[in-house]
Image (cartoon, grey):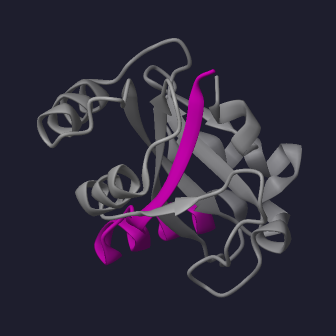
Amino acid sequence: MTQFICLLGGPAFSEFQKQKLLDELALRTGQSLSFTAQFIYFVEAPTALSKDQSHSLEALLQAELVDPEAAWPKSQTGAKDKESGMLFVVPRLGTQSPWSTKATDIAHRCGLEPVNRIERGTLFHLPEALLTPDQLSQVTPLIHDRMTQAVLSGIDQAAA
């Protein structure tokens, strides 16, 4: 059975990029908002990785393993994710990004042959006010490229 592994990485944006997005969000929504965005890595392997392989994967990606079934850790702002809301920006479903191809090749060269694929996305922790259908229609065009990316509302959708 194929294993689906998640790892949370560091901040996805520089302060400059984040401020630019905050300014655009404020223009579109008419609200002064805050959010955090961090990289999230999805790994597919045919079997569970050993402890050594898991540690190697964490070191390679500079990320921490997360159990997708468990409660999510607190966001960088300290708010619980269920309170702040989450959106996942990932490559379009059914495609493999160039980043994924290269990252998977590097993982194999680092002794992680059991890894079939590594894909990177961005996890946005957003205020609940932005998760209404009206607000989402204004926010999603700012956080993803509809030609190459998809926005998901849950980790279970990312397994696809």
* Residue 123 part of the magenta-drawn span: no
Residue 5 picture location, percent across and down: 54, 43
Q: Horizontally, is 43 left or right of 67 in the view?
A: left
- Residue at the (31%, 30%) spot, across then down: 100
State the residue at coordinates (26%, 30%): 113
Give the residue drawn at x 63%, y 42%.
140
Above or below, 148 relative to 69: above
The one nearer the camera, 29 or 43, is: 43
Residue nearer the viewer, 32 or 10: 10
Quadrant for the C terminus in the image: top right
**Which portion, as a residue range, is magenta?**
1-27
Nearer-the-camera pick, 100 or 116: 116
Q: Is residue 19 left or right of residue 128?
A: left
Residue under the point 53% across and 39% down:
48
In the displayed structure, 26 sits above or below 132; it is: below
Q: Is residue 16 magenta?
A: yes
**Residue 87's spot in the image, x, y percent?**
67, 50
Across and down, in percent, residue 41 comes to 45, 47
Q: Nearer the viewer, residue 108 or 119?
A: 108
Q: Tell which residue pokes out farthest to the top in this image.
A: 94
Total marks drawn? 0
Name the side, left or right, on which 99 lies relative to 75. Answer: left
Question: Measured from the top left, where is residue 136 in percent x and y?
Answer: 75, 46
In-image side of 62 versus 12 (left or right): left
Q: Height in image: 148 above or below 6?
A: above
Residue 29 quadrant: bottom right
User: In the picture, which quadrant includes the N terminus?
Assistant: top right
